[in-house]
Image (cartoon, helix red, strand yellow):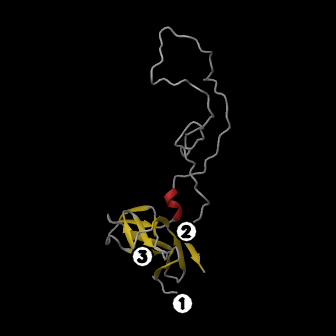
Amino acid sequence: MAKVPGSIWVEGTDWHYVDANGNEWAFTGDYVSTPSGALPGSFWIEGSEFHYIDANGAERKITGPDFGAKTGLAGSLWVEATWWAWLDASQHKHQAHSDYGDYYHSDYTDDPYYDSAYHQDEPYYEHVDHQDSALYVDHTDGPYYDTVLYHDHYDYSDYSDHIDEVFGTHLDQPVLVT
């Protein structure tokens, strides 16, 4: 059966649409929540994101870069070439692309440790003009880390609220469905 250009639907966890050439495309939106009484297949624009309820009743969202204000009705949806597109409440155009939400992320790698010529440990001695206060914390050497141009990530055993973030494997979407 031929696919009808402009068709849209939910299948499993995916949002499907058909482009002008009859090609079917699918996105797996990011899970948001499972609202009680949600109607599978429902869709809407919230802020700058496209939201839908998947076949299991889970709310999912698709994000995309902002292409600026455009003429048109806020909440409009369309297929542009192979991309899913919409106008948000402020009439800004967005095109869906899965790796947009993590646009500034790059995988972190540790740089090798090196001793800086500007740092030397010196033996402790009593200063007559210095006293520790309640806010003073003794210096200890820890692992070297470089935060410049990285994703705020370093392992430090004494940092109680540290959480390693998992970015997973990169997967471009939409996926062409054959």
Q: Which residue is mark 1?
A: 2
Placement of the C terminus among the 4 image quadrants: bottom right
Question: Residue 20 at x, y = what percent?
Answer: 49, 81
Badges 1 and 2: C-beta atoms under 8 Å apart?
A: no
Say how many tags the image has: 3
Left or right relative to 162: residue 48? left
Tell me which corner region of the image, top left, top right, bottom left or bottom right, holds residue 37. Answer: bottom left
What secondary structure is marked by label 1? loop
Q: Is residue 20 above or below residue 144?
A: below
Crowding near the residue tagged with mark 2, few <14, some 14–19, many ≥20 C-alpha atoms within 10 Å: some
Placement of the N terminus among the 4 image quadrants: bottom right
**Hey, what amino acid is under mark 3?**
Trp
**Hey, what amino acid is under mark 2?**
Gln
Q: Which mark is residue 72?
A: none
Mark sitting earlier along the chain (1/3): 1
- Front residue (pair 13, 18): 13
Question: Residue 92 at x, y = what percent?
Answer: 36, 64
Q: Which residue is mark 3?
A: 78
What secondary structure is marked by label 2? loop
- Front residue (pair 128, 176): 128
Q: Which residue is mark 2?
A: 173
Cα–Cα gap, marks 1 and 2: 23 Å
